[in-house]
Image (cartoon, coloured by chain):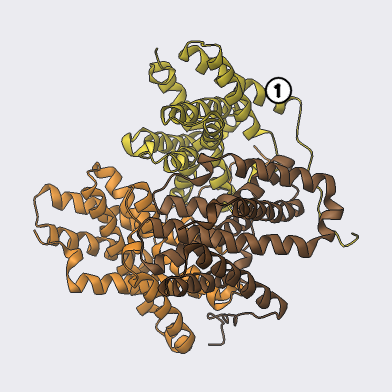
Chain colours: A yellow, B brown, C orange
Amino acid sequence: MENILQTDFTILLDLLGTFAFAISGIRLASGKQMDWFGAYIIGLVTAIGGGTLRDLLLDLTPFWILDPKYFLTTGVALIVTLLFKEKLFKLGSTLFMFDTIGLGLFTIVGITKSIDAGLPIWVCIVMGTITGSVGGIIRDILLNEVPLIFRKDIYALSSIAGGGVYFICNYFNLLTGLTEIIAALTVIIVRLIVVKFHIHLPQLQPLDTKKE
Amino acid sequence: MENILQTDFTILLDLLGTFAFAISGIRLASGKQMDWFGAYIIGLVTAIGGGTLRDLLLDLTPFWILDPKYFLTTGVALIVTLLFKEKLFKLGSTLFMFDTIGLGLFTIVGITKSIDAGLPIWVCIVMGTITGSVGGIIRDILLNEVPLIFRKDIYALSSIAGGGVYFICNYFNLLTGLTEIIAALTVIIVRLIVVKFHIHLPQLQPLDTKKE
Amino acid sequence: MENILQTDFTILLDLLGTFAFAISGIRLASGKQMDWFGAYIIGLVTAIGGGTLRDLLLDLTPFWILDPKYFLTTGVALIVTLLFKEKLFKLGSTLFMFDTIGLGLFTIVGITKSIDAGLPIWVCIVMGTITGSVGGIIRDILLNEVPLIFRKDIYALSSIAGGGVYFICNYFNLLTGLTEIIAALTVIIVRLIVVKFHIHLPQLQPLDTKKE
């Protein structure tokens, strides 16, 4: 069975996802009076933070130790930001697409690695979600903000939906490559629908008001 | 020698501790305009964060990967909060008791796992304290607050006291089960006394005032 | 080949570095209304945080589990701070020297451990930088600040420069001990020059201004 993650196409998507995650970090860093190095580190951590926590939890070698391309891609993201910043942010919706594709792909990478580690289905879905979401959480912690993911759109739930679809396809014995494409598309489509129609979960009301 | 951690009673206490830690996270999250998912994650991290760091440091499989009950208990905590919030927080002192019992039990779990890993006494006590305290620290970081534990009551010191008592009992060759009960009770009683009598450590005065 | 890290002299430097890192944590904690215990933990995490993350990433036993001297040195740092605070901070430049020596030595420890783990050069330099810098980042997260390192001086770049010099010396087959001394001195000298002449990287300008 061929693995989607080893084709040229998916290497390209992986780099695009890394690039988009790095840009999202650098962009948010730019509002906080950081120097270039600080912005680079924020971009890097946004891109590799989720996969790093996943690998620590699974007792695997952190993926970026095996391949410098994630550090290099983040460097390219910084240079592109510095050179083309005005043009770049006219491409806001293009960046959003990269980020969403990145989320889809990172989720599938997390699930695949967890299956290889022999973990139960629910842990695989959790690891897919961690891979897609934790980089953004660390980014927000470093920028001294309450993580966006806890307040705004249904970011992590897109990963969970994609994970569910992955194992449904798996149950019906679809080819691995096909399963991965369908699951990644699920993440991407759920996220696009959620953002398009401003769907959000109810807020939790403050529990400690004086009136009670 | 029977192990306190494997009896039905201690499984119940473990779940009560998890439940109370999760509630404490959800409660604090409710003041920060989070949606339900964000509140769930904050609750979850409060409950499992300490044990997860301990397992990473000891190179063990994170405990929650082996058993979905911690994720489920946190889900129950969220549902209970949403359904019964007014009644729940009339039970403030009951929740405080759960939280304190959780601290006691989590401390002992951390110590026991460290003894099994063949570590020296002082490391076991550190791991017990990490198990009991780090979840609350991560909760406060995610909520963008200086961790309460550094400012308010003698939370971590209760764990350390219980750890000390554990190894004193051990030295006198008490049965493991009895040792665990005495040590957990020490954590609980020290915490109750500290809170009851508003005992606190001296504050560190600012060191960089202009006057000096 | 003798290893610089095992001589009495380097054990002394390691302790001085730990002491200086701990003091820097305790000093910053003092501005945040912490109690003594909180200040101790902030000092400890500043001193051991970088090496702990390195060891987790390399799948090694965290170094402080094998030797209580880091916890004890932090305790001494707290006591010294409480007893001599006015005198201590007249020694501001002495503390800065300790901190800089600590950075140099911690960087070399990180590189050496990574070489022993058989990692490629660029990963060794990254690990040296993590060892020297991440403690301060965790300190700032716990104190609820945007990490200084992202905004102020070229802290991490000194580590990277020292790492580069390490592998240049290595390439020319210098003795390990000599290589380590030269690389540590590079870190120290780069940092001294940077601070002395107020060298800093350009800031990243805000990218999301309304004008665009």
Please tell me which residue lies in front, B92 or B210. B92
* Residue C203 to residue A157: above or below: below
For the image shown, how many numbered marks are present on the structure?
Answer: 1
Q: Is residue A146 left or right of residue C197?
A: right
Q: Is residue B24 visible?
A: yes
Q: Amino acid at mark 1?
A: Ile
Residue shown at 72% from the left, 64% from the top: B96
Residue A192's spot in the image, x, y percent? 67, 23
Is A77 left, or right, of C65 in this rendering?
A: right
Q: Is residue C140 visible?
A: no
Give the x, y percent position of residue C13.
Answer: 26, 72
Q: Residue at x 74, y 42 (%)?
A: B35
Q: Is residue C134 left or right of residue C66?
A: right
Q: Quadrant of residue C191?
A: bottom left
Question: Which residue is nearer to you in this view: B5 or C202?
Answer: B5
Q: Residues within 10 Å of mark 1 (few under 14, many from 20)?
A: few
Q: Position of residue B188 (x, y in %)?
A: 63, 69
Q: SS class of the residue under badge 1? A: helix
Residue beneath disc 1: A193
Q: Position of residue C23 (x, y in %)?
A: 43, 75
Q: What is the quadrant of residue A160 in the picture?
A: top right
**Chain letter of the residue carrying label 1:** A
- Image quadrant containing the N terminus of chain B: bottom left
Note whether A64 is above or below C205 in the view shown. Answer: above
C173 or B120, nearer to the observer: B120
